[in-house]
Amino acid sequence: MKSLVAVTPETFRKERNIDARVLHEVTEIDLKGRRVHVRKLDAAKEWWESFDQLLIATGALPIRPDVPGVDAQGIYGVNTLQSGIEVRQVVDQQAPKRAVIIGGGYIGLEMAEALVRRGLEVSLVERAPQVMVTLDPDMGALVSEALIAVGVALYREESLQGFEVGKGRVQAVITDKRTLPADMVILGMGVRPNATLAKESDIELGEKGAIAVNERQQTNVAGVWAAGDCAQSFHLVSRKPFYVALATVANKQGHVAGVNIGGGSAIFPGVVGTAVSKICDVEVARTGLQERELQQLGWEYVSGKIESSTRVGYYPGAGRITVKALAEKKSGRLLGGQIVGQEGAAKRIDILATALHAGFTVQEMANLDLSYAPPYSPVADPVLVAVRKVAQSI
């Protein structure tokens, strides 16, 4: 597991002169006194630590539904390395046979793949009509089909009602339509900002309860900063405050905050919501806004969806790819895109993400000078085929 740790506390201390204190918990922020209350978890010690500058980077917490039995043993939220290790140990040591996953987002899909590969009987409960609600329903349907194809029992449009518990341990998942026996349960219902400390200190909160920050990662309190999954961001397409819990965003925000705290000058302009995932041999990617969000904004848009191959069809290993692009109806400005396909599909989303950052129209994108060779792409890359189809509708 050591290979999964990017930087250890010892490395922080020896190579970067940073006093990284693990197993310490901050329980209170005193803004007037410019101090935080610290509790050392392995020594029962508590004290106040003063600060000149404070960065809040408390991350996010898995959503745990308020239903009967949710605190039973055998129910796991996977959002940290340690929580992943615990699930791995359960599978290795207890050899569970049946797993139920609640929620069809990124964590839910990735855990479904991992558990199927370990030979478990996996069921997934999703209250929406399709998994991956960050995709449009027609693209989410492709992911649902992929789940079923690898042996996942998929129960869509079903809501969690509670858990059957025996001797303190989960035995079944109860939905509004059925009861599913379970030896272990994975909660994949998303995360929420871990912003309790900030809220209790009267630091301003924003989108979805995340800590409100400006482009320098400053809060509304002088000398107090926030970054990562606890902090709000800004959507470059909608031009509105936005919350997303992704490692790429957290890393950039942390870098910007660090530069500014150290006396430099840096800004984080915002995000376009780019993300990728995988379920066995099916890759999933999205960026920008989806149809539901555009409808909520009241924007007029056009869409185009195409099916193609990841490589030239005659080349070994060519797989299917579906690309969907969305653009503003009058201007042709690209607004979003989604991709579902086999190996070589997902990273094409970066073309669309770059175009969103640049503010390209689909007409401008249609003649992008993208690379071509049979092992990598058809002559007309599927992304360009999709944006050309959208451009023809404007």
Image (cartoon, rainbow, N blue to C red):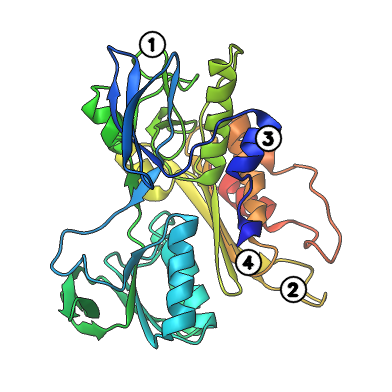
| Secondary structure beneath label 2 | loop
**Residue farthest toward the left in the current orientation of the protein:** 68
Residue 184 % position (x, y): 34, 77
Amino acid type at mark 3: Lys
Residue 109 can be seen, yes or no: no
Q: Earlier in the sequence, mark 3 or mark 2?
A: 3
> In front of the other: label 1 or label 3?
3
Q: Which residue is mark 4?
A: 321
Q: Earlier in the sequence, mark 1 or mark 3?
A: 3
Question: Between marks 4 and 2, how big is the CA–CA gap?
Answer: 9 Å
| Secondary structure beneath label 1 | loop
Question: Between marks 3 and 4, how big is the CA–CA gap?
Answer: 48 Å
Residue 350 % position (x, y): 65, 47
Which numbered disc covers residue 14? 3
At x 77%, y 73%, the residue is 313
> In front of the other: label 1 or label 2?
1
Amino acid type at mark 4: Ile
| Secondary structure beneath label 3 | helix
